[in-house]
Amino acid sequence: MDPLLPPGARAEYIDLDGGRVRVLRGGTPGAGPPIVLLHGGGTDNAAISWYRLFAPLSADHDVLAFDLPGFGATSGIEPVGGPGAMADFTARVMAASGISGGAVVVGVSMGGDAALNLALRHPASVRALVLIGPGGLVARFRNRAAHTAAWLGTRLPDWVLLPAARLANRFAGAALRAIVHDPATLPDEVVTEFRREALRPHGGIGYARYNQASIGRSEMHNNLLPVVEQITVPTLFFHGVHDPMVPPEGSCAAAALMPDARLVMVPECGHWAQLEAHDRFLSEVADFLGALEPTTKPEPDADPQ
């Protein structure tokens, strides 16, 4: 079975780091600021996260999404690890794909963490941010015992970790139901692809490496709250009120600290807010993009002769 392809997207492959990166493209270059989409963790991939959004966003923008190493159909490249390394990899994919100048970078969960790091590490690459339940904005898990358990899980050697991940992935359907507020809001195609991704031989390895880099013994290594005020580009936070994976408090705190940020809290919505509340998401993003100032000012009219 071929990998899932969102409506409005075309699949391409680019050679990078000795492997092949699966890239999804849509829209027309120059139609508006380019949009770069960064998927989440677990057994996510670009087609899953952005299945409902690719066609609408491509109507007026050049859109790029891709599978990070260790996810989806990207192959031959070792998972890069933490969000900083993901940001660096994203910058290289953008350059290899012909996206120059600032893009509107949209990230969900782990992808939101990578997007924040991209804005800090490669500021010229980012025109604006849209962050959906982003990681990287908490000091530690809410529950100390849960934090310790998660950290211990990241310390397992691969000969234990990988079989354990494959076993856990067999329950992908239950995991999916646990992270959303209403599973009926998800397209059947997304559910099928999520389960298929979980059953790949190395499904989830990219997320395992992210967690190993991010979860410290007593605190998170990827907490950006102390420096998030350095991000000055326009930013839209979109967070489900009932998100069981990423506490909304992180988005609330970051939005209050950043100089040009707005927070939208979405009722009756869980962790996959862009899929669960896609109509509301598209409306908010359209308003957000419409309010962005042009990156270049039009030339003044010539004086009449």
Image (spheres, rainbow, N blue to C red):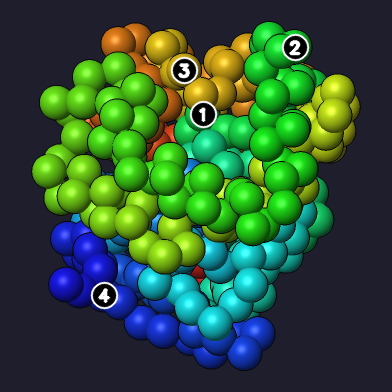
The residues tagged by marks 4 and 1 sit, at their Cα atoms, a distance apart of 27 Å
Q: Mark 4 points at which residue?
A: 10
**Residue 4 located left or right of residue 235:** left
Q: Nearer the viewer, mark 1 or mark 3?
A: 3
The residues tagged by marks 2 and 3 sit, at their Cα atoms, a distance apart of 16 Å
- Rendered position, 182 above or below 276: above
Verify CB contact (< 8 Å) between mark 3 and mark 4.
no
Q: Name the residue under label 2.
A: 144
Q: Residue 133 carries which label?
A: 1
Going from the N terminus, do you reach mark 1 or mark 3 first? 1
Q: Mark 3 points at which residue?
A: 244
Let me know if residue 24 appears in the view. yes
Q: Which amino acid is tagged 3?
A: Pro
Asked which quadrant contains residue 136, the reply is: top right
Q: Residue 228 carries which label?
A: none
Q: Which of marks 2 and 3 is in front?
A: 2
The percent position of residue 252, horizontal first and vertical second, equals 63, 14
Q: Which amino acid is tagged 2?
A: Arg
Going from the N terminus, do you reach mark 2 or mark 4 first? 4
The residues tagged by marks 2 and 4 sit, at their Cα atoms, a distance apart of 44 Å
The percent position of residue 88, horizontal first and vertical second, equals 72, 65
What residue is rendered at 51% in x and 29% in y? 133
Verify CB contact (< 8 Å) between mark 2 and mark 4.
no
Secondary structure at badge 3 equals: loop
Q: Which of 103 and 46 is in front in this view?
A: 46
- Rendered position, 163 above or below 270: below
